[in-house]
Image (cartoon, rainbow, N blue to C red):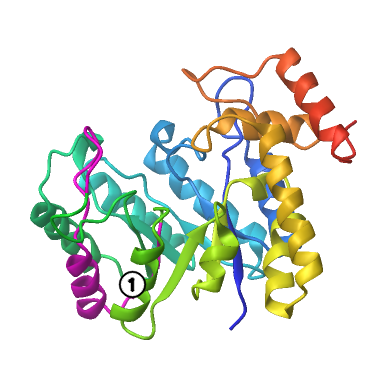
């Protein structure tokens, strides 16, 4: 099985706040040319919470057209919102022809307002209406029993038995994206889920996830360095340890140079701009990176050997 590299894509906006369709299509083409799959309109890095349903639909259409079947295109309906909103966005993605829906259990407002049982019930209602391949996105914590400490203020996590039951009841579920740095959970899912189920990890600890049987790695860094992210999974596939070590080290140094929160689009867009790519503007009310920020990024990335104009 070939390991897959996937990117939580940015959404470029123009100077007046509209979706920059040409820049987005060019970005997807660049990712696809590097062999990196595209996850469209996620919360955080994709600024999905600021997009209308029509804008979601259009982005899905543009991504499918630009990828041209070279890589996977996933839709990531924004989480923590009205389940009806998530359902409408999911249906738009199916009509656009995406390869999979990356689906998170709804929790209106993201404030833990639903119990574990209620979240599973909402997710089942959503899955009943989706006639497409689905990859479930786990929360940053998954309830495995009385020993799990849930961070105060976080959303109520789904229970591990719920994930297993859902995967058994819905054959459309093809995998799990594990968003927690939790090796035991990753292994437990592999042992307990049906054999068809693939597991995807994050760029943090990616060699760890691959060694534990991961089918792919999801990153935000691929927005800036897609060739490097693709090189990591390719080297792992080939067993090229020297190239793998060098590429992982380079990626971590790149992450340090970019800085910022992994859930915020501004540093990634600034890094793209610093390297001569079109990351586009942030949509209001988010703050734009300053010229000083971009110049500083250009210097840090240039010191790593990147061709910064």
Pointer 1 local density, CA inside 10 Å: few below 14, some 14–19, many at least 20: many
Residue 228, percent across and down?
Answer: 75, 56
Q: Nearer the viewer, residue 256 or 286?
A: 256
Quadrant the N terminus occupies: bottom right
- Determine whether the residue tagged by mark 1 lies in a helix, strand or loop: helix
When asked about the image quadrant of residue 13, the answer is: top right
Is residue 45 found left or right of 120 in the rendered image? right
Q: Nearer the viewer, residue 105 or 160?
A: 160
When asked about the image quadrant of residue 231, the answer is: bottom right
Residue 170, percent across and down?
Answer: 24, 76
Residue 279: in sight, yes or no? no
**Which residue is painted at 57% across and 39% down in the image?**
11
Residue 211: in sight, yes or no? yes
**Which residue is painted at 51% across and 65% down in the image?**
209
Residue 85, percent across and down?
Answer: 27, 45
**Count of number-bearing discs:** 1
Task: Give the vertical position of 212 relative to 201 (above or below).
Answer: below
Residue 98, percent across and down?
Answer: 48, 64
Q: Is residue 220 magenta?
A: no
Quadrant the C terminus occupies: top right
Q: Is residue 173 magenta?
A: yes
The residue at which mark 1 appears reads as 189
Is residue 117 found left or right of 82 in the rendered image? left
- The range drawn in magenta is 149-178
**Which residue is painted at 55% across and 72% down in the image?**
211
**Which residue is painted at 50% across and 76% down in the image?**
213
Looking at the image, the residue that sits furthest to the front is 147
């Amino acid at each position: 099985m070939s390991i897959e590299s996937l990117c939580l894509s940015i959404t470029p906006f123009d100077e007046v706040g509209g979706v920059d369709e040409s820049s987005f299509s060019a970005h997807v083409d660049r990712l696809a040319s590097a062999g990196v799959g595209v996850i469209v309109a996620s919360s955080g890095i994709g600024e999905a919470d600021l997009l209308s349903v029509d804008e979601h639909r259009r982005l899905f259409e543009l991504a499918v057209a630009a990828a041209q079947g070279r890589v996977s295109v996933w839709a990531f309906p924004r989480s923590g919102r009205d389940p009806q909103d998530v359902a409408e966005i999911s249906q738009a993605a199916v009509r656009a022809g995406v390869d999979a829906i990356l689906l998170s259990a709804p929790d209106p407002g993201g404030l833990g307002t639903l119990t574990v049982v209620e979240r599973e019930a909402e997710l089942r209602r959503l899955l009943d209406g989706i006639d497409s391949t689905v990859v479930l996105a786990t929360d940053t914590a998954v309830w495995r029993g009385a020993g799990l400490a849930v961070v105060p203020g976080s959303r109520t996590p789904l229970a591990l038995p719920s994930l297993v039951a859902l995967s058994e009841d819905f054959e459309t579920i093809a995998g799990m994206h594990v968003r927690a740095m939790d090796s035991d959970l990753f292994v437990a899912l592999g042992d307990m889920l049906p054999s068809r189920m693939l597991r995807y990890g994050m760029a943090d600890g990616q060699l760890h996830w691959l060694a534990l049987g991961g089918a792919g790695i999801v990153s935000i860094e691929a927005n800036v360095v897609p060739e490097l992210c693709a090189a990591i999974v390719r080297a792992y596939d080939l067993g090229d340890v020297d190239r793998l070590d060098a590429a992982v080290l380079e990626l971590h140094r790149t992450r340090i140079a970019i800085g910022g929160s992994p859930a915020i689009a501004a540093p990634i867009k600034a890094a793209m701009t610093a390297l001569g790519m079109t990351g586009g503007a942030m949509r209001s009310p988010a703050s734009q990176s300053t010229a000083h920020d971009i110049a500083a990024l250009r210097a840090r990335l240039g010191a790593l050997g990147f061709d910064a104009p």
